[in-house]
């Protein structure tokens, strides 16, 4: 992302992919750790695509638009929120897919070019939207990327790489920006697992025998969700 590239985050279910993206979006200290003081120039937008599965392209465009608006409000960027909210309302009045996309382009221009922010769209659980994908979806992403250049990135969160899930021609317009740039999450996340176990002990008001924890982790290989279910 620092180099202006897009990428894919791939893992099996239950190891904390959504948590990982949520930390990038909402944990300022983590952003400072990896981006330094320059983190203020990066704007992460978390979008859970399971919310719009089976929805058409027009709804996906609105969903991205609304996600950007919500992220501006949550970050306390009141003036920028008001500017983009006005663009969204004006675009939505026509109830036309092309007009709404034009409004989204204006939004990208404002944030990336005028404000100098690097906009990072985090597409969580994107595999659930794959059946509804069209080539126009990736063509639109390319249009947005071409406008903002290296100030626009997309992170696709998936159970398998896009190259394995969809036909190459469907992905052609955005292929060069994300294909092959894959970050695989490990099954075992020691820090995250330790936190989840400590949280379980706190809410249950019970201390779990360390030998039981060790035996379960050996059986589950530290898979986050499965380990917690076994401990429960």
Image: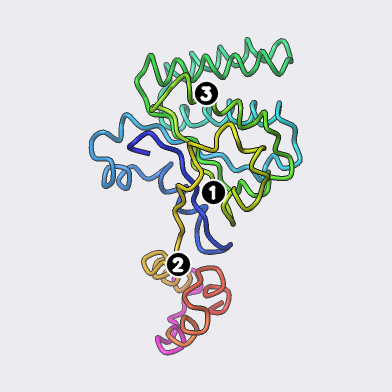
Q: Which residue is mark 1?
A: 157
Residue at (60%, 35%) from the top-left corner? 172
- Front position among marks 3 and 1: 3
Against 26, residue 217 (above or below) is below
207 magenta-colored: yes
Seen from the viewer's position, the closer of residues 194 and 56 is: 56
Against 145, residue 89 (above or below) is above
First to last magenta residue range:
202-213
Quarter of the view holding residue 31:
top left
**Residue 36, percent from left and from top:** 23, 40
Callout 2: 10 Å neighbours few (<14), some, many (20+)?
some
**Residue 183, percent from left and from top:** 44, 53
- Left or right side of 216 for 167: right
Choose the circle earlier in sequence order: 3 or 2.
Answer: 3
- Give the alpha-carbon distance from disc 1 to disc 2, as whole Å: 22 Å
Residue at (44%, 72%) from the top-left corner? 197
């Amino acid at each position: 992302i620092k180099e202006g590239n897009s990428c894919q985050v791939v893992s099996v279910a239950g190891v904390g992919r959504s948590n990982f993206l949520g930390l990038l979006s909402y944990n300022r200290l983590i952003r400072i750790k990896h981006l330094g003081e320059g983190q203020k120039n990066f704007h992460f937008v978390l979008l859970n695509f399971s919310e719009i599965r089976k929805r058409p392209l027009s709804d996906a465009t609105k969903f991205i638009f609304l996600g950007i608006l919500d992220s501006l409000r949550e970050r306390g960027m009141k003036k920028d929120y008001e500017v983009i909210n006005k663009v969204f309302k004006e675009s939505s009045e026509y109830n036309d897919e092309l007009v709404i996309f034009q409004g989204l382009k204006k939004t990208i221009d404002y944030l990336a070019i005028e404000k100098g922010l690097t906009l990072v769209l985090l597409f969580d659980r994107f595999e659930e939207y794959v059946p509804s994908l069209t080539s126009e979806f990736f063509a639109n992403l390319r249009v947005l990327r071409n406008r903002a250049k290296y100030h626009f990135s997309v992170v696709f969160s998936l159970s398998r790489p896009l190259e394995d899930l969809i036909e190459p021609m469907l992905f052609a317009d955005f292929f060069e920006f994300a294909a092959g740039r894959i970050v695989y999450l490990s099954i075992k996340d020691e820090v995250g697992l330790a936190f989840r176990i400590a949280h379980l002990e706190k809410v249950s008001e019970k201390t779990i025998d360390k030998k039981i924890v060790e035996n379960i982790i050996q059986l589950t290989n530290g898979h986050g969700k499965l380990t917690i279910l076994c401990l429960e």
